[in-house]
Image: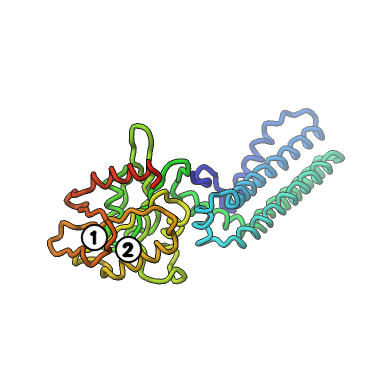
């Protein structure tokens, strides 16, 4: 499953300060009067402790977000690295962890000083100094806190994959009908349009049966170019093909309005086959309802011929997917 899905993000800088001071004020008001000095000590201690806890909470949330990268499945690690380099994650994590140590030392130091105060003015002075230094920590770590927040915004929306369930990755050039197929076969509702590059991220649907469930992964379209020239959108598809599939379903479009000519679509398939040849494949030629299609110019390999638009061969394809997954390809 997506390891960031249930994590809580840190607040923005202004909100951290406002939360800390508001809670500190409220908590100190609950301290009953038991003598001038004793009450001052308890109230100022409560304020320091409260601000410390709020700042620590947000630092730890950020640390958890960054640490989760190292425990995540390689699929999620690769997706995150597309936009958040591992070295940047490491540096940010190291600095935030250092801030936690500084925070702990400040808390211990000021609480210790409060033990020996002799008047309320001294207590207030120690509290003001403590809060100023404690609240300066998130200010100094604003860059790292914002980095963790932005990483979380991206990572927690990544698809949730169950690696204990069978996975079928649907791939191919742009505009071949990948999203339409996953909408037809599964529970997913993926945006579909008549122009290419509609899918810019990975989507997950499920085929539900009486005894088990299959995950269908819809991927962005792949262009006819070398791996090193592929952009971040295409690399999502590459990483899905690399890490996820029990079965790869590769689709072709033979229609006159296709985005790529047949030889280019075949070239993409052959590159993917060369990269991930250890996976079982299922080839599908879509849009056979068009009277001008010529499927002879495609592969000589066996391929399923379907029309999602006319619902031709789709149910047979679904049964083949179930059988191949059950038999392990």
Report x, y in % for residue 240.
44, 55
227 vs 267, nearest the viewer: 267
The image's mark for residue 194 is 1
Kindly identify which residue carries mark 2.
173
| Vertical comparison of 37 with 82: above or below | above
What residue lies at 53% left-to-right and 53% top-to-bottom? 74
SS label for mark 2: loop
Above or below residue 4? Residue 79 is below
For label 2, count other residues whose C-alpha is less than 10 Å away and answer few (under 14), some (14-19) or many (20+): many
Category of crowding for the residue at label 1, using alpha-carbon neighbours closer than 10 angstroms: few (below 14), some (14–19), many (at least 20): few
Residue 152, x across and y down, in percent: 52, 52
**Front-most of residues 312 and 19:** 312
Tell me if 184 is positioned left or right of 218 in this view.
left
Frontmost residue, 15 versus 62:
62
Give x and y (percent) for residue 259.
Answer: 27, 67
Tell me where residue 116 sits by quadrant: top right
Query: What's the residue at 17%, 63% (across, down)?
Result: 293
Q: CA distance from mark 1 to mark 2?
A: 14 Å
Is residue 179 in sight in this rendering? yes
Q: Is residue 121 visible?
A: no
């Amino acid at each position: 499953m997506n390891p960031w899905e249930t994590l809580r993000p840190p607040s923005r800088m202004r909100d951290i300060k406002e939360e800390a001071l508001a809670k500190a004020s409220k908590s100190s008001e609950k301290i009953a009067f038991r003598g001038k000095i004793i009450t001052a000590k308890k109230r100022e201690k409560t304020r320091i402790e409260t601000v410390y806890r709020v700042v620590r909470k947000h630092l730890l949330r950020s640390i958890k977000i960054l640490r989760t990268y190292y425990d995540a499945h390689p699929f999620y690690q690769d997706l995150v690295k597309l936009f958040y380099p591992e070295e940047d994650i490491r540096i940010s994590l190291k600095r935030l962890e250092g801030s936690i140590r500084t925070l702990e030392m400040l808390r211990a130091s000021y609480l210790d000083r409060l033990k020996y105060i002799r008047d309320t003015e001294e207590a207030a002075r120690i509290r003001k100094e403590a809060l100023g230094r404690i609240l300066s920590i998130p200010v100094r770590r604003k860059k790292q806190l914002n980095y963790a927040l932005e990483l979380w915004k991206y990572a927690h929306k990544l698809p949730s994959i169950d690696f204990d369930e069978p996975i079928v990755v649907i791939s191919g050039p742009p505009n071949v009908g990948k999203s339409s197929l996953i909408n037809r076969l599964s529970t997913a509702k993926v945006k579909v349009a008549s122009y290419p590059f509609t899918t810019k991220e990975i989507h997950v649907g499920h085929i539900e049966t009486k005894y088990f469930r299959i995950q269908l992964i819809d991927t962005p379209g792949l262009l006819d170019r070398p791996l090193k020239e592929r952009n971040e959108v295409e690399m999502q598809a590459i990483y899905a093909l690399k890490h996820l599939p029990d079965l790869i379903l590769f689709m072709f479009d033979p229609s006159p309005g296709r985005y790529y000519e047949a030889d280019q679509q075949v070239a993409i398939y052959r590159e993917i086959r060369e990269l991930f040849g250890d996976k079982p494949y299922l080839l599908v030629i879509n849009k056979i309802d068009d009277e001008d299609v010529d499927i002879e110019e495609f592969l000589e390999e066996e391929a399923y011929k379907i029309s999602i638009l006319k619902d031709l061969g789709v149910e047979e394809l679904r049964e083949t997917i179930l059988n191949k997954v059950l038999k392990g390809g």
